[in-house]
Image: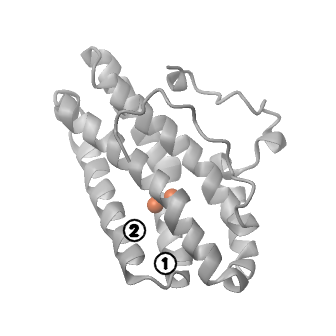
């Protein structure tokens, strides 16, 4: 996946073919892609904008992304047969957790490093795209019956994290991301 796609439109989420149990996690990918794009765009702008993008990312990290990673590992990892796919998920989560910790520990230092900001944005973007294209596809293919058994977990995620809920339940227009930083 190239890293020069900051202007590409966000995908419709969740994809129509996504298993119902995976849909809350797929919807959360939208918010993650918005943060990824915001970090990459802010890297080329002034310091105040960089700090704002980092603060927004940390907000999303604490309220949504951190628990999303934990849920993927707890619920989905056992449902994928391929060791390579499981290892990649854990490795990328580990890298992104370390980078988020770095943002929490010293946001000023991260804001001073445009390349690091670009890297965090690119890794988050590529991770989400890979999950949608490969990892979630593998989960559906390998263990659809086990996924169906996780329906109550999916309902719990929707209860806990607003970004995982279907938009129509929030009364938000389908085309409205609700976040200004998503604007190109
Ligand atoms: Fe993930
Ligand atoms: Fe994910």
- Dot label at residue 89: 2
Vertical arrangement, residue 63 with respect to residue 59, above or below: below
Can you tell which mark lies on residue 77?
1
Nearer to the camera, 137 or 98: 137
Q: Secondary structure at mark 2?
A: helix
The total number of labels drawn is 2
What kind of element bears circle 1? Answer: helix
Residue 97's place in the image compared with 170, above or below, is: below
* Residue 39 appears in the figure: yes
Crowd around label 2: few <14 · some 14–19 · many ≥20 (10 Å): some
70 over 24 or under it: above or below: below
- Of the numbered discs 2 and 1, the one sitting upstream in the chain is 1
Q: Is residue 122 above or below residue 66?
A: above
Q: Position of residue 76 (x, y in %)?
A: 55, 75
**Residue labelled 2 has its Cβ within 8 Å of some atom of ligand 1:** yes
Q: Quadrant of residue 52?
A: top left
Q: Nearer the viewer, residue 76 or 165?
A: 76
Left or right of 28? Residue 92 is left
Instruction: Provide residue 157's location: percent of width, then percent of height.
Output: 66, 62
Tag 2 and tag 1, C-beta contact below 8 Å: yes
- Between the residue at mark 2 and the residue at mark 1, the CA separation in whole angstroms equals 8 Å
x and y percent of residue 67 in the render? 50, 60
Q: Please tell me in which quadrant of the rendered image residue 57 appears.
A: top left
Is residue 173 found left or right of 164 in the rendered image? right
Query: In the rendered image, is residue 56 in sight?
Result: no
Left or right of residue 17: residue 83: left
């Amino acid at each position: 996946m190239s890293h020069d796609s900051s202007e590409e439109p966000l995908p419709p989420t969740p994809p129509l073919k996504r298993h119902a149990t995976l849909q809350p996690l797929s919807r959360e990918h939208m918010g993650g892609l918005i943060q990824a794009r915001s970090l990459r765009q802010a890297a080329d702008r002034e310091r105040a904008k960089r700090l704002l993008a980092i603060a927004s990312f940390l907000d999303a990290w604490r309220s949504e992304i951190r628990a999303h990673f934990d849920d993927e590992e707890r619920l989905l990892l056992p449902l994928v047969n391929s060791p390579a796919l499981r290892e990649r998920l854990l490795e990328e989560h580990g890298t992104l957790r370390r980078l988020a910790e770095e943002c929490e520990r010293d946001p000023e230092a991260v804001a001073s490093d445009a390349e690091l900001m670009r890297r965090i944005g690119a890794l988050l973007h590529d991770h989400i795209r890979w999950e949608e294209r490969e990892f979630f596809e593998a989960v559906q293919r390998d263990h659809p019956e086990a996924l169906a058994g996780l329906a109550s977990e999916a309902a719990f995620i929707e209860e806990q994290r607003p970004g995982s809920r279907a938009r129509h339940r929030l009364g938000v227009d389908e085309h409205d991301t609700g976040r200004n930083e998503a604007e190109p």
